[in-house]
Image (cartoon, helix red, strand yellow):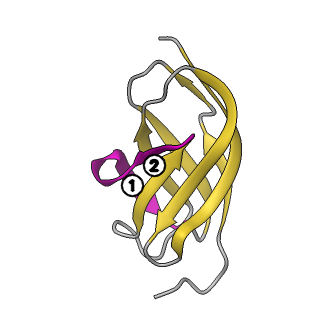
Amino acid sequence: MKPSAAGVISGLTPSTVTGRYANELTITGSNLVSGSGTDVTEVQVCGVSYSGADIVSEQSDSVVVDVSLEATTDTCEVKLFTVSRGQPSFVLNVEIRACCS
């Protein structure tokens, strides 16, 4: 079932990831998923894919994912893939700063 309203990613918190350990990133927006708990199939952050247990929670206005990134200061894409909207569902260009612990 497709969500009735168009969705949009509006932000990412935090925008600074420290260290190479798992950090929770929260992708915020509106109408991101249809229902909750099983719509998100994959999240890509700077070309790195996260799925399954990496996806902590998903709701209409937020998706939380555990990520671990190499040291970088780049503008890159965050992609959200869902069952209800097809692949990729949303793309956001953000500056990610990943650095040392």
Q: What is the tally of numbered marks visible in this picture?
A: 2
Q: Which residue position holds label 1? A: 57
Residue at image location 43% in from the left, 36% down from the top: 67
Q: Position of residue 11 (x, y in %)?
A: 67, 49
- Location of mark 2 (residue): 64
**Residue 66 higher or lower than 100, as above or below:** below
Residue at image position (51%, 40%) is 25
In the visual, does 36 lie left or right of 25? left
Q: Are marks 2 and 1 in contact (CB under 8 Å)?
A: yes
Asked whether, in this view, residue 33 is left or right of residue 52, the answer is: right
Mark pair 2, 1: CA separation: 5 Å
At a point 47% along the width and 18% down the height, the residue shown is 19
Categorize mark 1 by other alpha carbons within 10 Å: few (<14), some (14-19), many (20+): some
5 horizontally vs 101: left or right: right
Magenta-colored stretch includes residue 12: no
The local secondary structure at tag 1 comes to strand
Give the magenta-colored segment's residue range: 46-60
